[in-house]
Image: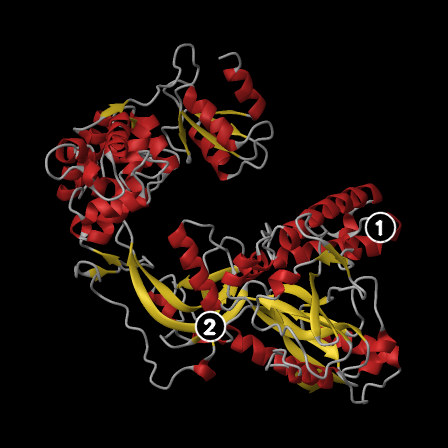
Amino acid sequence: MAFSSVDTLDEKEAGAELARLADLLAKANAAYHTEDNPFISDAEYDALKARNAELEARFPQLKRPDSPSDTVGAAPSDGFAKVTHEIAMLSLSNGFDQSDIEDFDQRIRKFLGLGTSARLDYTAEPKIDGLSLSLRYENGALVQAATRGDGSVGENVTANARTISDIPQTLTDAPDVLEVRGEVYMSHEDFDALNQNQKNRGGKLFANPRNAAAGSLRQLDPEITRSRPLKFFAYAWGALSEPLGETQTASLARLNALGFVTNPMTRLCAGTAELLSHYTKIEQARATLGYDIDGVVYKVDDLSFQRRLGFRSTTPRWAIAHKFPAELAWTRLEAIDIQVGRTGAMSPVARLHPVTVGGVVVSNATLHNEDYIAGKDNKGGTIRGGKDIRVGDWVQVYRAGDVIPKVADVDLSKRPKDATPFAFPETCPQCNSAAIREEGDAVRRCTGGLICPAQAVEKLKHFVSRAAFDIEGLGSKQVEQFYADGWIKEPADIFLLREGFGSGVRQLKNREGWGEKSASNLFDAIDDKRRISLGRLIFALGIRHVGEAASNLLAQHYGSFAAFEKAMNDAQELCGPAWEDLIGIDGVGEVMATSLVRSMGQPAERGSIDRLVAQLDVQDAARPKLEGSPVAGKTVVFTGTLEKMTRAEAKARAEALGAKVSGSVSAKTDLLVAGPGAGSKAQKAAQLGIETLDEDGWLELIAGI
């Protein structure tokens, strides 16, 4: 998340940003704590709060009454009775690296008057990613359970809490008043089972175990909570009629003896070196715990020190949460599979032991290509220090935002002794055709073409995608089904579905999941797309390197399918006027042009295209406005910086007036439009005697047309 430096803001700008942050963080708190449906990640939330604190530090006079710095959680839901906490349930301050933890230790030593050599013990325990809960016992009986809420007032969820097996209903030999605090969570195994059950019932799927646990505890019907596999870890206490112990460690042991589950990975650590060592151990074990954690919590062990240190407005001085990097996690690589795409590209995929990264459960990650697996980049240089990736490895998974997860590192100390280097297949796993890697290509590709089922299915999926034919009711799932049944093998077969499966014994309406109405709707939707624009058709063919924008460029340039087809035929030798015309189109390079011509010239591919076009009414591209245009039929080149329009706008305007826009200056260039910073193209145009205009001259030339 990128921000401008606080030092560059004036008071007015800072005030406006503080207002925006207050509003955004309030909404984020409500979504996370009240609605159990967060819309930003924990890392983004932490960054926003840090930004708010930085602004308040520089402009203390601008601190708002509703400052996020003074806020804990969110207001309780109206669906539950309210509970006022006798002792507020505060949040924790966060640390993100070693220096933050060392600063935390130094602040405590300074506050307590302890020297750097004095022993100072801390507890370190996994920070459970769940929902905070407070349990009040009086004379050994559970009388009340409440969520954190806004820290002062929470929601009464007593009936729901009684359904959780980890929560004792009665205690023996407990203080007369005991308020136990901890975290309600859901294990990975139970989360997977719950989501599978939800899927089978057609219910809502949960994004991660934290959302599932929070949503389950905060049900208005306790029987729904009872049906959900919730667990509880105790880690703290609120109101007490007598102390549980003299230290954090002893108090946790007392809670455990009373029947509460405490985290077995909690350790007593002497100083920051031991804290950081245990942090690393917990981080490495994260994927094997069976539940989600997002950091490690450190607390001063001596309770008399805790009392002296006291509290800030929303956090205790004696504790800190050392957060894991939100985008990173360690887990086991269980297998490497090869997926084959529509262009034959063979992509390795890591199958992982599931782990939550950035609030999302990750079980797969890209491995890019065979060089990446081998610890090399595409030029033969080393990555990850040259460490290769093997099945069974303990790997670090990286995910940021919506980026596809990838394997970032390998812990060689945990590599199984029998792990062997991964041998990238030289034949396609789908059709056994040879898989070759051409010089300069980072990817190995199956040569099976249309005989490869993986390529055929992926091409068909691309064909019906939104930017291509976009046939309502015919998506990836239906394509896979029809292909597996032998109903469609190539795009033309889609337009023969009504003829083949609209009547007779094998009717679509008689298949599971289909009826007469849905089958008829699909056939009608297919017929509606027989009339298609040339640009969409070219894109739908799924030719390597030819994307949506390039497809429209080609359509605009050639105008009709007949002209396009003839040009591809004439350019088969990759030379001559047709070839020069093709690569002269601004936005079409030799790589794209070669792929296009080769595909159109390959007999099987061309046969498939011809059978498809025979079923269609391909619409000519809209022709540019030529009448009265001073640039119709001319080749125009834009260079330098355009100040009154974007390059894309200028290009589109020129093409609409019948000009051909080229990316390079040659003897065929008729006009150069040069903005500030024009370099070699302007020099070459001058040498060739080509007419040159500045941006104002260009706008004057085309004014009123």
**Left or right placement of residue 293 versus residue 240 in this view:** left
Residue 581 visible, this orientation: no
Give the farthest residue toward the top: 628
- Comparing 9 with 120, the one in front is 120
**Left or right placement of residue 91 versus residue 263 in this view:** right
Q: Is residue 623 above or below residue 651?
A: above
Q: In this view, does 80 lie above or below 380?
A: above
In the picture of the structure, the residue carrying the numbered disc 2 is: 331
Q: Is residue 297 above or below residue 348?
A: below
Q: Which colour scheme is used?
A: secondary structure
- Comparing 469 with 178, the one in front is 178
Q: Position of residue 189 (x, y in %)?
A: 45, 68
Neighbourhood count class around disc 1 (C-alpha, 10 Å): few under 14, some 14–19, many 20 upward: some
Label 1 or label 2, whichever comes before in sequence order: 1
What's the residue type where badge 2 is placed?
Answer: Thr
- The residue shown at (36%, 20%) is 633
Q: Where is residue 142 in the image (x, y as percent from the top left)?
A: 69, 70
In the picture of the structure, the residue carrying the numbered disc 1 is: 63
How many numbered callouts? 2
- The residue shown at (69%, 58%) is 156
**Left or right placement of residue 668 versus residue 579 in this view:** right
Q: In this view, does 354 lie above or below 598?
A: below
Neighbourhood count class around disc 2 (C-alpha, 10 Å): few under 14, some 14–19, many 20 upward: many
What's the residue type where badge 1 is placed?
Answer: Lys
Q: Position of residue 334 (x, y in %)?
A: 37, 72
Looking at the rendered structure, the secondary structure element under dot 1 is loop
